[in-house]
Image (cartoon, rainbow, N blue to C red):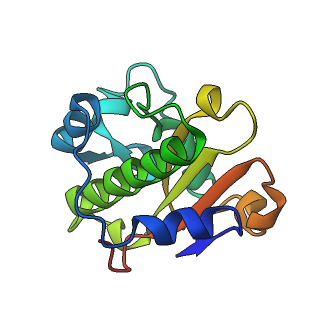
Amino acid sequence: MRTNAVMLPLWQATEGGGLEVLPDELRDLVDFGWRIGPAGALVLVGCYGDGSGWRGDWQAEDIARHELEVNDVGIPCDDLPKARDQFLHGAVARSRAFADAAFRAAHGLTASDLLVAVVSVGVDDDYLMHGATVKFATRRGRFPSTYADLERFQYEAIAILDACEGHE
Protein backbone atom coordinates (compact mmCIF):
# COMPACT_ATOMS: atom_id res chain seq x y z
CA MET A 1 0.00 0.00 0.00
CA ARG A 2 1.19 3.47 -0.86
CA THR A 3 -0.30 6.81 0.14
CA ASN A 4 0.53 10.42 -0.35
CA ALA A 5 1.33 12.57 2.70
CA VAL A 6 -2.22 13.95 2.78
CA MET A 7 -3.77 10.46 3.00
CA LEU A 8 -1.39 8.94 5.54
CA PRO A 9 -2.88 10.43 8.75
CA LEU A 10 -6.44 9.79 7.52
CA TRP A 11 -5.55 6.19 6.68
CA GLN A 12 -3.83 5.60 10.00
CA ALA A 13 -6.84 6.99 11.87
CA THR A 14 -9.10 4.39 10.25
CA GLU A 15 -6.90 1.38 11.08
CA GLY A 16 -8.53 -1.09 13.42
CA GLY A 17 -11.71 0.96 13.40
CA GLY A 18 -13.93 -2.04 12.73
CA LEU A 19 -15.90 -2.73 9.62
CA GLU A 20 -17.63 0.25 8.08
CA VAL A 21 -21.24 -0.45 7.21
CA LEU A 22 -21.46 -0.01 3.46
CA PRO A 23 -24.43 1.75 1.88
CA ASP A 24 -26.74 -0.49 -0.15
CA GLU A 25 -25.35 0.62 -3.52
CA LEU A 26 -21.81 -0.38 -2.51
CA ARG A 27 -22.96 -3.67 -1.00
CA ASP A 28 -24.82 -4.39 -4.24
CA LEU A 29 -21.67 -3.78 -6.30
CA VAL A 30 -19.76 -6.21 -4.11
CA ASP A 31 -22.58 -8.77 -4.20
CA PHE A 32 -22.86 -8.59 -8.02
CA GLY A 33 -19.17 -9.43 -8.08
CA TRP A 34 -16.64 -9.41 -10.87
CA ARG A 35 -16.45 -10.87 -14.34
CA ILE A 36 -13.84 -11.30 -17.00
CA GLY A 37 -14.28 -8.69 -19.73
CA PRO A 38 -12.58 -8.00 -23.06
CA ALA A 39 -8.90 -8.98 -23.30
CA GLY A 40 -9.18 -10.71 -19.90
CA ALA A 41 -9.94 -7.50 -18.02
CA LEU A 42 -11.42 -7.69 -14.50
CA VAL A 43 -14.60 -5.63 -14.35
CA LEU A 44 -17.21 -5.10 -11.67
CA VAL A 45 -20.49 -6.55 -12.95
CA GLY A 46 -22.45 -3.63 -11.48
CA CYS A 47 -20.34 -1.16 -13.48
CA TYR A 48 -19.88 -3.17 -16.68
CA GLY A 49 -23.23 -4.91 -16.91
CA ASP A 50 -23.51 -7.10 -19.98
CA GLY A 51 -20.88 -5.00 -21.75
CA SER A 52 -23.28 -3.57 -24.31
CA GLY A 53 -22.38 0.02 -23.41
CA TRP A 54 -18.64 -0.54 -23.78
CA ARG A 55 -16.35 -1.20 -26.69
CA GLY A 56 -15.10 -4.77 -26.83
CA ASP A 57 -11.94 -4.34 -28.87
CA TRP A 58 -9.59 -3.77 -25.94
CA GLN A 59 -5.91 -4.38 -26.52
CA ALA A 60 -3.84 -6.20 -23.89
CA GLU A 61 -1.53 -3.21 -23.40
CA ASP A 62 -4.53 -1.00 -22.54
CA ILE A 63 -6.27 -3.30 -20.07
CA ALA A 64 -5.47 -1.21 -16.97
CA ARG A 65 -6.70 2.01 -18.60
CA HIS A 66 -10.01 0.37 -19.56
CA GLU A 67 -10.42 -1.25 -16.14
CA LEU A 68 -9.92 2.12 -14.42
CA GLU A 69 -12.56 3.63 -16.70
CA VAL A 70 -15.14 0.89 -16.06
CA ASN A 71 -14.39 0.24 -12.39
CA ASP A 72 -14.70 3.88 -11.31
CA VAL A 73 -16.97 3.91 -8.26
CA GLY A 74 -18.23 7.06 -6.59
CA ILE A 75 -18.45 6.45 -2.86
CA PRO A 76 -21.72 7.78 -1.41
CA CYS A 77 -20.90 10.34 1.27
CA ASP A 78 -24.14 12.32 1.60
CA ASP A 79 -24.93 10.77 4.98
CA LEU A 80 -21.52 11.57 6.51
CA PRO A 81 -21.09 14.47 8.94
CA LYS A 82 -20.33 17.74 7.10
CA ALA A 83 -17.59 18.89 9.49
CA ARG A 84 -14.31 18.55 7.55
CA ASP A 85 -12.39 16.16 9.82
CA GLN A 86 -15.37 13.89 10.43
CA PHE A 87 -16.29 13.86 6.76
CA LEU A 88 -12.75 13.03 5.57
CA HIS A 89 -12.30 10.26 8.13
CA GLY A 90 -15.71 8.81 7.25
CA ALA A 91 -15.01 8.98 3.50
CA VAL A 92 -11.65 7.25 3.91
CA ALA A 93 -13.10 4.56 6.19
CA ARG A 94 -15.96 3.86 3.78
CA SER A 95 -13.67 3.82 0.74
CA ARG A 96 -11.27 1.49 2.50
CA ALA A 97 -14.06 -0.89 3.56
CA PHE A 98 -15.45 -0.96 0.02
CA ALA A 99 -12.04 -1.65 -1.54
CA ASP A 100 -11.42 -4.49 0.92
CA ALA A 101 -14.84 -6.04 0.25
CA ALA A 102 -14.33 -5.78 -3.52
CA PHE A 103 -10.90 -7.43 -3.21
CA ARG A 104 -12.45 -10.31 -1.28
CA ALA A 105 -15.15 -10.70 -3.93
CA ALA A 106 -12.50 -10.91 -6.69
CA HIS A 107 -10.38 -13.50 -4.89
CA GLY A 108 -9.72 -16.54 -7.03
CA LEU A 109 -10.48 -14.94 -10.39
CA THR A 110 -7.83 -14.88 -13.08
CA ALA A 111 -5.43 -11.97 -12.45
CA SER A 112 -7.13 -11.02 -9.16
CA ASP A 113 -3.70 -11.11 -7.51
CA LEU A 114 -2.76 -8.19 -9.81
CA LEU A 115 -5.77 -6.11 -8.78
CA VAL A 116 -5.16 -2.67 -7.27
CA ALA A 117 -7.52 -0.03 -5.91
CA VAL A 118 -6.95 3.70 -6.24
CA VAL A 119 -8.68 5.45 -3.33
CA SER A 120 -9.16 9.19 -3.76
CA VAL A 121 -10.75 11.61 -1.30
CA GLY A 122 -10.91 15.34 -2.02
CA VAL A 123 -9.36 17.47 0.72
CA ASP A 124 -9.57 20.98 -0.77
CA ASP A 125 -12.15 23.55 0.28
CA ASP A 126 -14.71 21.76 -1.91
CA TYR A 127 -14.25 18.41 -0.14
CA LEU A 128 -18.03 17.97 0.15
CA MET A 129 -18.42 18.29 -3.63
CA HIS A 130 -15.38 16.16 -4.50
CA GLY A 131 -16.24 13.32 -2.15
CA ALA A 132 -14.49 10.00 -2.64
CA THR A 133 -13.90 7.51 -5.42
CA VAL A 134 -12.39 4.05 -5.65
CA LYS A 135 -11.10 2.79 -9.00
CA PHE A 136 -9.87 -0.73 -9.69
CA ALA A 137 -7.43 -2.04 -12.29
CA THR A 138 -4.88 -4.78 -12.69
CA ARG A 139 -1.17 -4.16 -13.01
CA ARG A 140 -1.03 -5.35 -16.59
CA GLY A 141 -0.17 -3.63 -19.82
CA ARG A 142 0.54 0.06 -19.50
CA PHE A 143 -0.58 0.79 -15.96
CA PRO A 144 -0.97 4.59 -15.86
CA SER A 145 2.19 6.40 -14.80
CA THR A 146 -0.10 9.04 -13.28
CA TYR A 147 0.05 7.07 -10.05
CA ALA A 148 3.86 6.76 -9.89
CA ASP A 149 4.23 9.96 -7.83
CA LEU A 150 1.31 10.29 -5.42
CA GLU A 151 2.63 13.54 -3.96
CA ARG A 152 1.64 15.33 -7.15
CA PHE A 153 -1.97 15.05 -5.95
CA GLN A 154 -2.13 18.10 -3.69
CA TYR A 155 -5.89 18.39 -3.37
CA GLU A 156 -6.64 14.70 -2.96
CA ALA A 157 -5.76 12.14 -0.34
CA ILE A 158 -4.63 9.15 -2.44
CA ALA A 159 -3.91 5.53 -1.58
CA ILE A 160 -2.94 2.67 -3.88
CA LEU A 161 -3.89 -0.72 -2.44
CA ASP A 162 -2.81 -4.10 -3.76
CA ALA A 163 -5.23 -7.03 -3.50
CA CYS A 164 -2.38 -9.38 -2.63
CA GLU A 165 -1.64 -7.42 0.57
CA GLY A 166 -3.69 -8.02 3.69
CA HIS A 167 -6.31 -5.38 4.45
CA GLU A 168 -8.45 -4.78 7.54
Give the left or right position of residue 82, taking residue 42 as reference.
Answer: right
At which x and y percent is residue 94? 37, 48
Give the left or right position of residue 36, taking residue 134 as reference.
Answer: left
Whether residue 51 is visible here, answered yes or no, is yes
Residue placed farthest to the left in the image? 31
Q: Nearer the viewer, residue 130 or 28?
A: 130
Residue placed farthest to the bottom in the image? 165
At which x and y percent is residue 135? 51, 47
Give the left or right position of residue 22, taking residue 47 as reference.
Answer: left
Q: Nearer the viewer, residue 36 or 3?
A: 3
Residue placed farthest to the front in the image? 83
At which x and y percent is residue 88? 54, 47
Q: How many numbered circles are shown?
A: 0
**Residue at point 68%, 45% (across, down):** 123
Whether residue 59 is visible here, answered yes or no, is no
**Residue at point 40%, 54% (across, down):** 93
Q: Nearer the viewer, residue 112 or 77?
A: 77
